[in-house]
Image: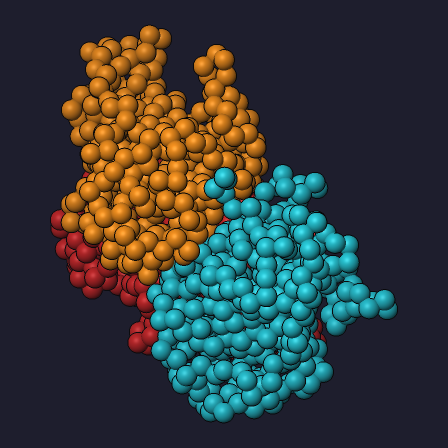
Chain colours: A cyan, B red, C orange
């Protein structure tokens, strides 16, 4: 019997199966500093303890996307080691901020299975939860991936496709305890725009761009203990290129979006997302956003803004899909999320 | 109205204007570790809590230049986003060590303005101060940059050129509370040379060299939240090169100067500096120093040494300017600073 | 007199000489995070405070190899700056875990000297000890290097070759205070295999590979304050290549060995090691292990497993030396160590 992990194949999943993922991780100021070294992240709430405290939090949390990457990374050996494609996200919610010193682990439940008509692959839907050392759920999301079958003769399971919300109802967003934007300091935050200044349908080009290096995306991906070979091993793909972890593009685009959305401080909901085209080293990533919706919250001075965040490999703004309904070749990422900002 | 920051142009500045810069930052052991990963920094006071405590400090501070980079980085979106050139520094003083857990922000006052004769650009002088979470000024410096005009028809302001000290009077240097080199451990520090062993005019070639990679200078520059596009975006310059942040060269040269100046522990004064030639990835940076002056301080066993630190792209030592008075092509940096060392 | 450090030459060493190395270092969560960003390290005991506490430790220690690199790095300016080759290791033992906040320094005693027959070089044997801020020895090892003579006319010393153990007796391994694997969580650790599941002679191919970038190995090597020019300066070698620090390959291979040896948690003994072939940027490093021995320990549920860890530049598994007794060209590292795992 081999002792190495071959990963799970499509026929290894069953509805209701719960997989507790390995390698819990304690985060510290080190992960925070690296996040800021890898991405041009400037949202003040994640940069300054004093700013976070003025907003009612005990300290500056680890970036929401860093928490996501840690939770996600643990699922890779169990969920996507043999994945052909990462197909989508839904119903993502951040439930508790993560602070330096917290230890995260994650667990996934199989909620959907559908074999493809080619008989060689199938789609697996999992709901993943990240827990801290007090067993509090800090975030959850649904993700579905196309996974290869190892034994093509294995019988197809009864198809189950979960009914997933297209958008999280703003009433279901969880606002961190104590969050209060009543005395928000726009000068320290970097921009004067509150939610009332944004209009649904407004498109914002974030101007700045970053050319990605191999060392950077590999350091990021390792930091989240994501083990997928395709990100690290230049001999793995026939073309010798290392595919950049989609989460690296998410964090890069989100950080670039500071320029125009500096006050969209906390991410609390992930409605959906597509890695529209693969990204490789040498690409200059830019980003644009579109305001999709706005909502009130119960927290003082805190509004929820729904944003489309698009990462592109050129300077285009506002162009997403072609006449054929397919993503344009320069689109790397199309993400739909809820953020909290001063109302 | 666009929500992204176009940066200020020459006509947007006025004498006496105070700009509070955005994005305060809490530093931790993460920033310390990254500083040591990015530069071959070995000065013991910044490497070991135990060594710093033996010198009378409560703990090992964040490197003085890291504190400078954090304070400086915040000024970029307000001061140098449209800068054509970073022209000089003066009257820089470190007033309080910065420790892990401190939160830094910065503020600049416009102290000089002079439109250039071409009518298209002008020189802006700012005095920048960095403050910690107790509103204590941790450092201050004057910097002047050449900035483009957006509207070339805007009237030229009354020229004001501040009268800046060529050299900080050693009596004005601020010695950190408690600093005491009476029981200095030269073995742990790495070299036996005290200030008395150095002669004014002495030139020291620091021997070692480091070839710079794109990923490194970009990680450093992001870590200090410096947003200037020219450092990150390979499509920004016509030649496709990313200009290395001048501060990266400063820190590299200072770290290399350990070999010969291991006991020049703390930087307390910045008399002046010029980024003599641009630096790009692939350059092997070496450094040499010249002893410019020496002075006593009131602290026990602590002397102040004035040093010229020169970064070069070859192995030359002691050669600075040509017969035309211009910097030689291999000179990347010419920095004039005061450091504290055992007397 | 020059103030820079030329390093010691063969004739500068004498038997019994003790060298206290410079630049003590305090480690923090920053070093931990960087270790995880630089290597695909996933052993749970070094990733999670909660997991380490469940195993009886006060917190998750700094990776054993990171502690080794810190202790080793300090020796470079005194031992191997003029080394032609790093010849071997023996009698390495980890005696105390290192935790965030600890300050390490190191000291070496010359225990062997043998001039080579060519009269130009000689072999220096040192026993190095790393101490924490409480003067407790945290690790020790013997290393021997070939060092150039500066003055080829210097007389050869009386040859002294120390009698070094080929293998550390398992009774001499030091188990960290409190370590207890009785309630070991195999799910969180990532694999179900306990020591009883491994057979002496078993070979494990670790499957995954990582292609190394210049920025990564230089950041790692600087982080450990290793100053050897050959790792950083592309102008140093005639071929323009930067030799990768052998310790970088050790850490990479050890991290890759998680896949198949996830429960070989703590390294407590280093029996020997050879950097079989040089490694350069662009190499895709893979690894395989061979079980060499197993032993009981006095700690509850804790066994000691002796492993050969081999790093290779291709996908070969189990092939070490050719018919000529020399390492095959793809072998980068051959390391022999003791690790602790659930019995």
Q: Farthest residue in the top direction?
A: C117
Q: In this view, does A259 lie above or below A236?
A: below
Q: Is residue C37 above or below residue C158?
A: below
In terms of depth relative to the viewer, which is nearer, A148 or A226?
A: A148
Can you give x and y, in whole percent of width and height, for residue C267 in the image?
32, 41
Can you give x and y, in whole percent of width and height, for residue B261 in the image?
31, 42
* Left or right of C147 in this view: B312: right
Name which residue lies at 36% across and 78% down: A58
In terms of depth relative to the viewer, which is nearer, A204 or C33?
A: C33
Can you give x and y, in whole percent of width and height, for residue C50 in the image?
33, 61
Name which residue lies at 28% across and 10% down: C153
Name which residue lies at 42% across and 42% down: C261
- Quarter of the picture holding the N terminus of chain B: bottom right
Q: Is residue B146 at least partly visible in the picture?
A: no
Q: Is residue C241 above or below residue C262?
A: above
Q: In which quarter of the image is residue B190?
A: top left
Can you give x and y, in whole percent of width and height, for residue C159 in the image?
22, 12
In terms of depth relative to the viewer, which is nearer, A126 or B302?
A: A126
How many marks can you see?
0
In terms of depth relative to the viewer, which is nearer, C303 or B227?
A: C303
Q: Is residue C311 at least partly visible in the picture?
A: yes
């Amino acid at each position: 019997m081999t002792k190495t992990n071959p990963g799970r194949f499509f026929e290894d999943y069953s509805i209701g199966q719960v997989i507790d993922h390995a390698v819990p991780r304690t985060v510290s100021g080190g992960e925070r500093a690296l996040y800021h070294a890898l991405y041009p992240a400037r949202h003040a709430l994640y940069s300054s303890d004093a700013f976070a405290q003025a907003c009612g939090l005990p300290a500056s949390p680890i970036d929401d996307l860093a928490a996501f990457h840690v939770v996600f990374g643990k699922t890779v050996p169990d969920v996507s080691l043999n994945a052909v494609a990462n197909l989508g996200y839904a119903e993502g919610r951040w439930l508790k901020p993560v602070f330096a010193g917290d230890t995260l682990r994650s667990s996934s439940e199989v909620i959907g299975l559908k074999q493809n008509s080619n008989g060689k692959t199938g789609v697996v839907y999992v709901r993943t939860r990240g827990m801290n050392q007090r067993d509090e759920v800090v975030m959850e999301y649904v993700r579905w991936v196309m996974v290869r079958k190892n034994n093509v003769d294995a019988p197809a399971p009864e198809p189950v496709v979960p009914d997933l919300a297209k958008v999280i109802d703003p009433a279901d967003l969880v606002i961190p305890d104590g969050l209060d934007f009543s005395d928000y300091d726009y000068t320290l935050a970097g921009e004067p725009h509150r939610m009332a200044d944004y209009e649904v349908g407004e498109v914002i080009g974030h101007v700045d761009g970053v050319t990605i290096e191999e060392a950077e995306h590999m350091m990021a991906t390792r930091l989240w203990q994501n083990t997928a070979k395709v990100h690290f091993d230049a001999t793995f793909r026939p073309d010798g290129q290392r595919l950049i972890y989609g989460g690296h593009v998410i964090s890069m685009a989100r950080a670039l979006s500071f320029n125009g959305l500096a006050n969209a401080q906390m991410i609390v909901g992930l409605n959906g997302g597509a890695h529209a085209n693969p990204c490789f080293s040498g690409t200059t990533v830019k980003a644009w956003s579109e305001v999709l919706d706005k909502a009130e919250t119960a927290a003082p001075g805190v509004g929820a803004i729904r944003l489309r965040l698009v990462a592109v490999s050129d300077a285009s703004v506002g162009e997403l899909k072609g006449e054929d309904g397919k993503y344009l070749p320069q689109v790397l990422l199309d993400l739909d999320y809820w953020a909290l900002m001063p109302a």
